[in-house]
Each structure stands twice: as structure tokens, then as C-alpha cells.
Image: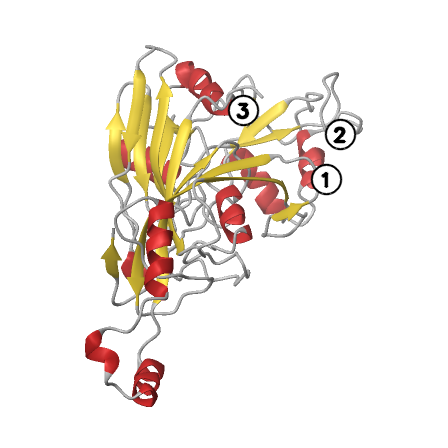
Amino acid sequence: MPRSPLPPREGISATALRAPGGKATHAKNHLPVPDSIGAWLESEFPEASPDSRRALMTDGDMRDEAGLPVAWDDPVIPGGFYFFHRPVPPEERIPFEVGIVFEDDDLLVVDKPHFLASTPNGRFVRECVVTRLRVDLGQPDLVAIHRLDRITAGLLVLSKRPETRGRYQRLFQDRRVSKTYRALAPAPPPELEFPLVRESRLVKPVGGRQVHEVAGEPNAVSRIRLLRTITTRTSVSGAAWPPQREGSDHEQRDRWEGERGAPPRREDADVDPRDRTRCEDEAPPRRGVAEYELSPVTGKTHQLRVHMNALGLPILGDPVYPVDLAPDPYDFSSPLQLLAAKIEFDDPLTGLSRRFESALELDPAAVSSDPVETR
């Protein structure tokens, strides 16, 4: 697709629409070419009012790909691209700010907050990182060069210049970028060995929000490492086991197995077992929360969230896995505890190694009012 001759308006890119016909292969090249631009727009937008369609010429400043203004009775260029600005209504502000991590002539690396979309989508056009920063920084050419879910926080890389954008985009397309995430999820059961690799085939049904693991050749690979556990007094979903202490995964588990069968302490020896049972029943439940390091080898939609859920360790605050809660997008009460923490790659322009780290942190308090960390 040719570059739009229209600059962004209020940070929002012009819409591109391709006409029927033409010799190039595209979805509508087999359709008859309407007699005029007006007849074409009537067929493209049958539910719009006549005034709304005509407003694309005036308010929308409709242009052909050569940048020439378009009139209602002009002939249609078969297979040609046309550009115009759609009306975009106001949006309630997402009350979180974008942090600048790094900037040079070609790249802008930011810390995206939870709940703010990376790029314009159906519901959020103005309230996304790209639109906000184009306006706030006066940089209309900003484009995000990879994806980060709206409810995931952390590092997002944007391109500032169209002239160098393609070389950075190819890094991500060719999987030459190392991305490391951190997540909070239920602590694992003792039989789950870390580090581990999860491989599976992921499929997203048409019209559904959840991505599913299905039988077949794997198309998604994630590396998962256990970093630490946090003891909380608030129950969380999923299996849990007592908090870890100093030592390797195996040493910690061996120590716990030994302690679990140890005789009661002297100060407990004279306590009536019935009183001990009653006290334990009345005490708040102690469940485990753990912090994990997640490294996606592939980049499928929701990959890390699906793989953690498949292990019985759904990421805390996830509104889709294991159950799709269909939350209000303006409900900010339970942020997903997933953070894009580190991005590394060799710069295709300079050959220098780039390493960026997020200044954001996961929040154990989001799942417990009384977290007690044990390292």
C-alpha cells in the first residue's frame, strides 16, 4: 500500500480504502468498477447518510494516492487507493501516563501502562500510546513496530522515521529480538520442575477472545523460569505450596519436604490437638504467589497467558484466562500482573547491542493486602 498523502489529524492516521477492479491481486479486484466516486462510496457505506458520505470529500479531505483531491463525480481509478479522515468521537481518558525509557533519531522506547492500548483499535483510537504520543510529542510519524496487549504493561518500541522503520520491523518479524517478561501467578506445585519449556499449537476461534491449545504441530514456544515466591494471606486461584527460601529449586523443595514431616516444636508439644485444629481453621488461609520470568520464542496472540494458564498457573488479574470475565475496559481495579520487562537486539543501523529495561514493577499488593516476600 502506498504511503498516505494525508498527515495524521489529531494524531490519528487517515483511513485507506481500495477501489474495486484493477490488475493487481486484492480482495475486490474481481468486482465491477463503479461509474463515479459517489456511486462507489454509496456501495461501500450503504448504512451511512448521504451527508456523511459527502462529508468524506470535505471534512475528510479525501485524496487519491497521488495526493489529488477527490470530487463526488470523479471516475474511480480501478484498484486505486484513496485516503480520507473519518470522524472520531471523543474518548474518556485512560488515567495512566506513558513513560519515556529511551529516544534517539530513529527509535522511541516507552513504558506502556496497564489498560492503555498500544495502537488504535475498534474502541480506543485516541486513547492509545501511538495517538497520544504523536500529539504530545509533535511526532506524526510515530508507529509501534511490535504488539503489546492493552492490559499488559511494559516496554513498547516505536519507530520515528519511515526511512528506517522497515529495518527495525524486520528484526521483530525475523525473531531477532529477545523479549523477557515477568509475571505474578500462583506458586507452582512441587511436582512442576523449573526452568521449563512449553510448546503447543495455539488457535484463536473466529469471533472469540480466548486462544486455545489444540492438538497438532506446535506453533508457540515459551520458556518459563521461577524467580521467587511471595506468601500472602489472601487466597488466589490455582495450586500453591509453601514459600521458598534460599537455594535452588530442588534444594528448596527437598527442604520443604523434610520440614513438612518434622515433629512439632517443643512449644507446641503441650497444646491440645483440638485447640491447634481450631486455631488453624480460624486463621486466614496462606497461599503462595510466585514471580516468573517468561521468554516467548514465538509471538502468538496471548501466548504467555495461555501457556501459564495451561500449566495451572493463570497470571493474576487476567480477565480472559481461565474464565473470560468480559470486564468493562474502564475498570482498572485488577491489573494483569504481566510486565514486558526487557528487550534486547542488535541495532540494524549501527550494529550496536541494544538493551532496554522497564522501570515499572509488578504489584503483589494487587492480589494481597498482606504480602510477605521470601527469597
- Choose the circle earlier in sequence order: 1 or 2: 2
Amino acid beneath label 3: Pro
Q: Which residue is mark 3?
A: 69
Is residue 102 or residue 79 the one in the foreground?
102
Circle number at residue 34: 2
Image-based side of 308 in relation to 362, left or right? right
Which quadrant is the N terminus positioned in?
A: top right
- Choose the circle earlier in sequence order: 1 or 3: 1
Does residue 79 lie above or below 274 as drawn?
above
Q: Is there CB contact under 8 Å for labels 1 and 2? A: yes
Is residue 26 or residue 88 the one in the foreground?
26
Circle number at residue 43: 1
Amino acid beneath label 2: Pro
Within the image, what quadrant is residue 181 found in?
top left
SS state under label 2: loop
Does residue 295 lie above or below 229 as drawn?
above
Amino acid beneath label 1: Ser
State the CA–CA distance, disc 1 to disc 3.
20 Å
